[in-house]
Image: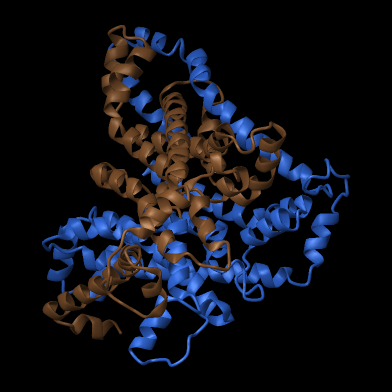
Chain colours: A blue, B brown
Amino acid sequence: MSQDTLVRPVAAAKSKSARPQKKRALFAGDVRLGWILVTPALLVVLGMVGYPFVEAIRISFTDRMVGRGPGRWVGFANYEYIWGWPGFAEMVTRTVLITIAAVAIKTLVGLILATSLNQNFRGRDVLRGVFMLPWILPTYIIVLVWRWIFDGQTGLLNQILMSFGFISENIPFLAQKGTAVALLIFVMVWKGYPFYALTFLAGMQTISPELYDAAKVDGAGRMARFRHITLPGLRQVMGVVILLSTIWTMNTLEIPMLLTGGGPSNATEVFPLLTYHLAMQNFRLGEGAALPIMMLPVIGLLVLAVAGYMDKEATQ
Amino acid sequence: MTQIVDRIPESVFRVISTVVIVVLFAMILFPLYFMVTTSFKFEAEIYSELTWIPRDPTISNFRDAIFNFHIPLYLSNTLLVAISTTSIVVVVSVLASYALTRLRFPGRAAMARGVLFVYLIPGSLMLIPMYLIIVKAGLKDTFPGLIIANMSFSVPFCTWLMMGYLRTLSSEIEEASLIDGCTRLRSLWHIVIPLSLPAIITAAIFIFNNVWNEYIFALVLAQDDQHKMISVGLANFYRSDYYMIGPMMAGSLIAMTPVVLLYILAQRHVVGGLSAGAVKG
């Protein structure tokens, strides 16, 4: 596990050392210094993450509202209310389906792009730089631009379709259920897949070309080489990227908030957005705090899976 | 399927991958191209019909964004918060990651594990308590409030990133320096920090970028103009029923310039420092 890797370099150096006596003395001051160096970070984490986390749990058991004092203790009332809310199951399903769709498409397009870029040609580094743009550009800018493009009245997409004569009337892309969901996933993919591609590409470049040559000599086809050399070589990288990205995608608030605001008729209202609406629009902080806590088991399982992968990676 | 793919000759395969790259490339540039061209168009042209090149280029949108929509003020607010957050976070995280990967003290293993978990706590869970705490502390609509909110997710992230790097960095030189009588702190300052400078720069860029690109906490924590972040300022163009596309595109172009410049300057570091942990979105 990770502890072993942490200790390993020190232990290895120790066994090599010709002066074990002095070596032991090297770590004498570590306990105090260690705590001193960790303290600022620990204070930040305890004060700015730990304390709010505990507060979130406490608030979820109250009927606290914005600007109306601390609220009363209501036990599990908020949880029961959300659980019993008719749209709850639908919202969870929606969140999970949108997340799965976005992650699956990101993975697929990322793999295709990485495979295509994994060849030698001129200008590859420049291309790679441009493909990084969606990842580095601010999400709000990307979403605002796409929202204007998809706009039902003055949007660019309508203008383009119109100028080519494909449509004669504007289509309200973001005001129709089907297209709104599809475009939400599209923007998530657009923003996310380049990062997948570039990490996959980095992973592919660590695979020894000799493996491919040997497989070719043995008569393995392109698909066989991909399946038996590329994919196994990428397993570690892919596992970490997909799991982490699933967590981020599921928690994405900016994209649905700025693109559709959850509409039309809640078709794109995913769990982070509902949390925001409960707390900041309905001012019901207790319910707003309870909802993400109810989603915590799902995210917790993903986090444990990531931690498992990371440990494997660290010990390899 | 397998057989079909295998039978494609190498030359055709190259053509297919070129087509894939070209299509995806076009999809990346499409919104950006129209963002840039639209920012130079007059309003009438934006709303009337599709033009690939501005018919009558104008800088009125930029003038609007700068003089009527306070973009320079929001930019300097954002710059202040981003630089303060980044400096504090880098110092705090480098110290912690050094201790967590190099020093031996009780509690280290647990803390080293905890970093990842803390980093992955969903932002939607933190939003409400953080908002209440900041309000209670009287820090709403202040820069310290924004810096605190940004630090809360940057410190675990940066510590985790630096720990990953330090683990791959051989500790032999450090060991040698310690045997020669160098103190831990001197070895940290003269050996570890210079050696991990590329990782520190990468981490700093990620943090700066994250603060610059943050929208939700900025929206909730600072609503007055004097402390508004650029993200909130730009999204406000869409608030009203009247869409101000021209100034918004001009403002977006201005707002993304620092991030893109920073990235171009440091591309080598960022690509080198690409680790799975930097996935966001």
- Quarter of the image where one finds residue A109: bottom left
Camera sees residue A228:
no
Camera sees residue B78:
yes
Tally of marks:
0
| Residue B246 percent across, percent down from the top left | 41, 64
| Residue A247 percent across, percent down from the top left | 53, 56
- Quarter of the image where one finds residue B191: top left
Left or right: where B80 falls relative to B170: right
Residue nearest the viewer, comparing B213 with A144: A144
| Residue B214 percent across, percent down from the top left | 50, 48
Residue drawn at point x = 43 percent, y = 73 percent: A149
Residue A310 against residue B134 in the figure, above or below: below
Residue drawn at point x = 34 percent, y = 79 percent: B50
Residue A301 against residue A44 in the figure, above or below: below
Residue nearest the viewer, comparing A307 with A108: A108
Which quadrant, please, contains the N terminus of chain B? bottom left
